Image (cartoon, helix red, strand yellow):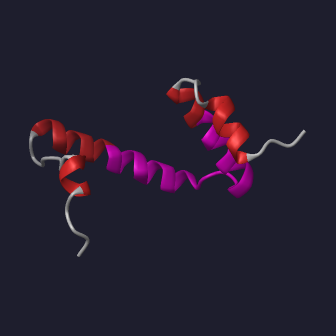
Amino acid sequence: MQLSADQIVEETSDWPEDAVADLVDRILRAKYGEADPSVDKAWHDETRRRIADMESGKVQGIPLVARVHQPIA
């Protein structure tokens, strides 16, 4: 039986966030193949750097609400 996108969304709406993330990851890997390990490492490093910059106060985040209400340039 083939499920529609709407059915999948309905079926997974009460799943924990990590289970949904795992499903999305599995779908993407099935469709597009495994990610290049060097790209995965680069993103991992970049994410850690950005988190460290936020936690140290080196940079400040922009609240989402502020961004949503700004006109598009």
Q: Depth check: 16 or 55 in front?
A: 16
Q: Main secondary structure of the magenta part?
A: helix
* Quarter in which the C terminus is drawn: bottom left
Query: Residue placed farthest to the right in the image?
Result: 1
Q: Position of residue 67 (x, y in %)?
A: 22, 56
> Which segment did they paint magenta?
22-47
Q: Locate residue 8: give its quadrant.
A: top right
50 horizontally vs 30: left or right: left
**In the picture shown, does residue 33 fall above or below 51?**
below
Q: Is residue 26 magenta?
A: yes
Q: Position of residue 45 (x, y in %)?
A: 36, 47
Identified at 68% across, 30% down, the residue is 11
Please state which of residues 37 and 73 is positioned toward the viewer in this rendering: 73
Q: Residue furthest bottom?
A: 73
- Residue 56 sits in quarter: top left
Magenta region includes residue 25: yes
Is 46 placed left or right of 56 in the picture? right
Q: Is residue 13 left or right of residue 31?
A: left
Residue nearest the viewer, comparing 16 with 3: 3
